[in-house]
Amino acid sequence: MFLGLRTVIYPAPDLDALKAWYTEVLGFGPYFDEPFYVGFEAGGYELGLLPDRPVDAGPITYWGVTNADDAVAALIANGATAHDPVTEVGEGIRTASVLDPAGNVVGVIENPHFAL
């Protein structure tokens, strides 16, 4: 079901400061820079900063899937609990998350633009 890791998104309560820090650490700026989300392309993968995600919620990792709806249904059928519904986040990219039996957030991302 999982095609491989695709994205990790970190909470960013001070988006500008964290964007500057990752720019320094990575040695380049973001490819996507908006007040609601900042995205860096790092080695073919997405490193995202999300200002409205609480720090105590921790980062969320997204696994690539071919169909987000099918993946969520399969995960729930195997004992996961719904967390965030499948949502179109722009340009045909769809994300969702479930909670595994231990309560960990497991994200899935359907991204027609992703290529290794």
Image (cartoon, rainbow, N blue to C red):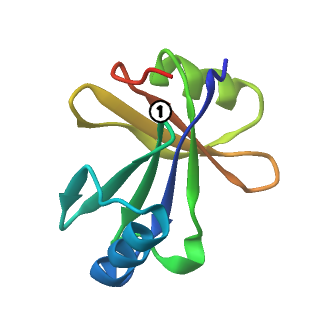
* Residue 94: percent from left, percent from top: 36, 31
Disc 1 is placed on an element classified as strand
Residue type at mark 1 is: Ile
The residue where tag 1 is placed is 109
Q: Is residue 73 left or right of residue 95?
A: right
Q: Is residue 15 left or right of residue 67?
A: left
* Residue 58: percent from left, percent from top: 59, 69
- Residue at 48% over, 35% down: 44
Q: Is residue 29 above or below residue 6?
A: below
* Residue 19: percent from left, percent from top: 34, 72
Name the residue nearer the viewer: 27 or 80: 27
Name the residue nearer the viewer: 107 or 5: 5
* Quadrant placement of the N terminus: top right
Q: Is residue 86 left or right of residue 82?
A: left
* Residue 76: percent from left, percent from top: 66, 31
- Residue at 23% over, 63% down: 36
Alpha-carbon neighbours of circle 1 within 10 Å: few (<14), some, or many (≥20)? many
